[in-house]
Image (cartoon, rainbow, N blue to C red):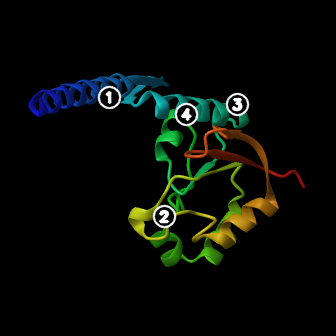
């Protein structure tokens, strides 16, 4: 009797595990195609990236500078918008080494059109979240000089892109 229960449990577990693997496989095959650049990713990330690229394209012109914080070079590439020539990644080690005050002075001079802050974790580099665990001066400066124009995926707390457009003086 116990053997039948164990075998039934193993069969049930194998069935559930197989269904989850099939779902994962199906979810990892979404194509993103912008400006003749094609990448495959999970459907969840793909839809979020597509929406953010759409927002960047809508809020900026081709010659505008768009800063993605803490990281997001793929968004610059897909939207065909340039990043800053000097400060282009904002993981903890870079913001500490390059110093927040110097970064802010640079952006006061350059004044990029759009700054995108996302809440993807940077825990692989040390502190986990920009604006919360590090980079607080930079984020305060952005909030003083830029206004929120749109938020992508605001109803899904795991990943969110906040698009800050430069305030008009």
Residue designated by label 3: 58
Is residue 140 depicted above or below 112 in this figure?
below
The residue sitting at 73% across, 61% down in the picture is: 142
Residue designated by label 4: 48
Decide which of tag 1 and tag 3 comes sooner along the chain.
1
The x, y position of residue 31, in whole percent, is 41, 22
Q: Secondary structure at mark 4?
A: helix
The x, y position of residue 10, in whole percent, is 17, 31
Q: Residues within 10 Å of mark 4 (few under 14, many from 20)?
A: some
Residue designated by label 2: 91
Q: Residues within 10 Å of mark 3 (few under 14, many from 20)?
A: few
Mark toward the viewer: 2 or 1 = 1
Whether pointer 3 and pointer 4 mark residues with C-beta atoms closer than 8 Å, the reply is no
Q: Residues within 10 Å of mark 2 (few under 14, many from 20)?
A: many
Work out how far the residue at label 3 is from the one at label 4, CA to CA, in angstroms.
15 Å
Is residue 64 depicted above or below 101 in this figure?
above
């Amino acid at each position: 009797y116990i053997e039948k229960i164990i075998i039934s449990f193993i069969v049930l577990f194998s069935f559930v595990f197989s269904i989850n693997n099939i779902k994962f496989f199906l979810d990892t095959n979404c194509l993103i195609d912008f400006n003749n650049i094609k990448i495959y990713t999970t459907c969840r990330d793909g839809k979020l990236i597509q929406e953010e690229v759409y927002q960047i394209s809508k809020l900026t012109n081709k010659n505008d500078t768009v800063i993605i914080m803490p990281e997001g070079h793929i968004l610059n590439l897909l939207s065909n918008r340039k990043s800053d020539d000097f400060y282009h990644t904002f993981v903890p080690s870079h913001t500490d080494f390059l110093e927040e005050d110097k970064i802010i002075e640079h952006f006061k001079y350059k004044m990029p059109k759009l700054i995108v802050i996302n809440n993807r974790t940077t825990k692989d580099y040390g502190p986990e979240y920009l604006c919360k665990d590090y980079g607080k001066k930079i984020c305060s400066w952005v909030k003083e000089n830029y206004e929120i124009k749109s938020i992508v995926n605001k109803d899904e707390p795991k990943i969110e892109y906040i698009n800050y457009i430069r305030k008009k003086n």
